[in-house]
Image: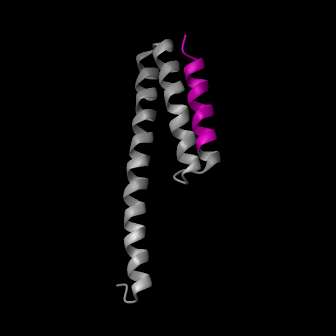
Amino acid sequence: MANSPQAKKRARQNEARFQVNKARRSRIRTFLRKVEEAITSGDKDVASAALRDAQPELMRGVTKGVFHKNTVARKMSRLSARVKAIG
């Protein structure tokens, strides 16, 4: 357990940051789930709209440090390829 005032403050800050990042991650996963559901439904218009909505959320996750930029680039690439493949 933290003993010094500085360590106690860092513990408080870490907990607050963890809660913010957890909410951000959850929000991004929700957007990704919507894209996945649209892809499985087979509706290309809905899927591409969901992908357009998800992209800024993913990029915001990169700038806020929740995800690595290559992780997001990989996810966007794979999702856009799957949306494009819908006949």
Task: Point out residue 53 in the picture as x, y percentages from the top left corner.
Answer: 49, 27
Q: Residue at x 50, y 12 (%)?
A: 45
Q: Which residues are magenta?
A: 72-87
Residue 85 located left or right of residue 45:
right
Query: In the rendered image, which quarter contains the N terminus?
Result: bottom left
Residue at the (42%, 68%) spot, across then down: 14
As drawn, 16 above or below 87: below
Q: Quadrant of residue 52?
A: top right
Asked whether residue 83 is drawn in magenta, I would say: yes
How many circles with numbers are drawn on the protein?
A: 0
- The quadrant in which residue 13 appears is bottom left
Q: Nearer the viewer, residue 36 or 9?
A: 9
Q: Residue furthest bottom?
A: 3
Counting from the top left corner in percent of width and height, residue 12 is at 37, 72
Where does the C terminus fall, quadrant-wise?
top right
Residue 26: percent from the left, percent from the top? Answer: 39, 45
Q: Residue at x 56, y 24 (%)?
A: 82
Vertical arrangement, residue 70 with respect to residue 83, above or below: below
Residue pictured at 53% horizontal, 46% vertical: 61
Magenta-span inclusion, residue 8: no
Asked if 87 appears above or below 31 in the picture, the reply is above
Left or right relative to 23: residue 59: right
Residue 81: horizontal and vertical position, in percent? 61, 25
Predominant secondary structure, magenta span: helix
